[in-house]
Image: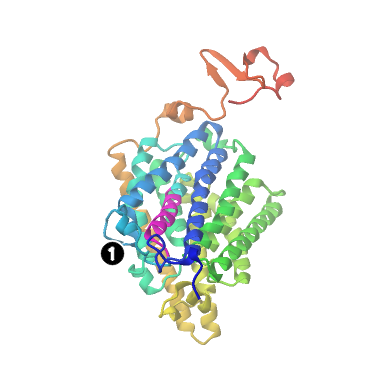
Amino acid sequence: MELPSNLIPDEASPEWMNKGDNAWQLTTATLVGLQTIPGLVILYGSMVKRKWAINSAFMAFYAFAMVLVCWVGWGFRMSFGDKLVFFLGKPGVALDEKFLLKRAFAGYLPTATMVFFQSVFAAITVVLIAGSLLGRMNFRAWILFVPLWFTFSYTIAAFSIWCPQGWLAKLGVIDFAGGFVIHLSAGVAGFTASFWVGPRAEKDRRNCPPNNVILMLAGAGLLWMGWSGFNGGAPFVASTISGLAILNTHVCTATSILTWLLLDSLFFGKPSVLGAIQGMITGLVCITPAAGVVQCWAAIIMGIISGSVPWYTMMVLHNKVKLLKLVDDPIAIFHTHAIAGGLGGILTGFFAVPKLCRLFYMVTDWEKYLGLVYGLQNGRTPAGFKQMGIQIAAMGFVIVLNVVVTSIICWFIGLIVPLRMSDEELENGDDAVHGEEAFALWHEGERLVGRRHNNKVYDIREFSFGEYKDEVQMV
């Protein structure tokens, strides 16, 4: 029996390529890209005071572009290429069609698809760091920070944990979609960079309401739904594990939100939108290293833990631990990513199911992947404790790597440009830094003006805001 014409291999669709997997992988990559552009751009721009809306959104926008260029220039091969040393691959470009059209190192995909898929993960990691530095980092320093941190930190963690030749990968660490590589790295690096850059202006720290709560929810929604691609694309195949990973992702996240809201209601008397978003993020982050290798009931337990432990560190410990009080983390990236990512990695070592690990990794030595729960159940307790030890070792490696490398990078950049904005820029925000304002009334010469619905320009002082509040628009 002959194959349908659309399934017959040809030069553009070689025998080794699965069209369905390739389409799925490109779709998931795009979903992850949308988490940043526009997801985090909207979320960052709306969570801060309005005088920092443009700067905050622009930090994310710039980082996404810079990382993609660095990725094809040298980053992909440093992260997934031939081994240079036990923790890093050889630098090299990913630009030639002979390289990009051959089969990727995993899955039934062309390398071009793999390069794009992995690029959006690298980009969102750096954008997450920006969340720790909003409202005071010199934008020129950020321009330098992005390629340096990406080159000397992200590629090392990615190669060590995700590349088949990496030393932690060979030990058997389980990081399904980036609990260590992405979230723990970003949380620790952001916290470290915040220490070196210093806090925001005192008045910005005291009074910093979101400038648009509805837009904040829109950005959070893009982040949440985009996580279907984040975790669903990790197996590099449209498989049963992809479906399980997506289901576990959303179940854990919903449970985490409800847990956070319950704690807010019990201790503060009312639930809050900001609390719901923080609970959403901690749930998404916590399930990421485990999404496709744990049972759905375990995802619910992880959601309860991710909605309570980071809540406690953020709401209680943050005000008691001197270092946490000293470092200014505007949108709590340390708690939502470092704490939740570390928790997720450890819980993965506890709940990982051997059969699901076999279906995910598809390697001959799959039996080394064993959660402690199943080690205790199957009489392989030492193997279960070994898995927990490997998870903890990987967490320690990522923490030390990012504290050391981020500190060196901040010191180096400080020799070239100030890490911190000038006092004038800290006072005036977007207008001083970029010459633009997001939600300000439009200035025309010395007149403060606004637009009414008929598109004519009027001097605002001619109107009573009580009478015309529905007609005057922000521009």
Q: Which residues are magenta?
A: 109-126
Question: Residue 321 placed where, x, y %?
Answer: 50, 52
Q: What residue is shown at x 34% (from left), y 67% (from top)?
A: 166
The residue singled out by tag 1 in the image is 82
Question: Is 120 within the magenta?
Answer: yes
Q: Is residue 338 visible?
A: yes
Q: What residue is shown at x 46% (from left), y 37% (from top)?
A: 58
Question: Residue 158 placed where, x, y %?
Answer: 38, 60
Quadrant of the snapshot with the C terminus? top right
Q: Residue furthest bottom?
A: 379
Main SS of the magenta segment? Answer: helix
From the viewer's perspective, tell me whether residue 257 is left or right of residue 314.
Answer: right
Question: Is 119 within the magenta?
Answer: yes
Question: Residue 422 placed where, x, y %?
Answer: 39, 30
From the viewer's perspective, tell me whether residue 381 is left or right of residue 243.
Answer: left
Q: What residue is shown at x 37% (from left), y 74% (from top)?
A: 171
Front residue of 465/342: it is 465
From the viewer's perspective, tell me whether residue 320 is left or right of residue 63.
Answer: right
Image label count: 1
Q: Secondary structure at mark 1?
A: loop
Where residue 101 sits, quadrant-wise, is bottom left
Question: Residue 190 placed where, x, y %?
Answer: 43, 49
**Residue type at numbered disc 1:** Asp
Front residue of 1/345: it is 1
Q: Residue furthest right?
A: 467
Where residue 160 sits, quadrant-wise, is bottom left
- Circle 1 Cα neighbour tier, 10 Å, few/some/many (<14 / 14–19 / ≥20): some
Q: Is residue 429 visible?
A: no
Q: What residue is shown at x 54% (from left), y 80% (from top)?
A: 374
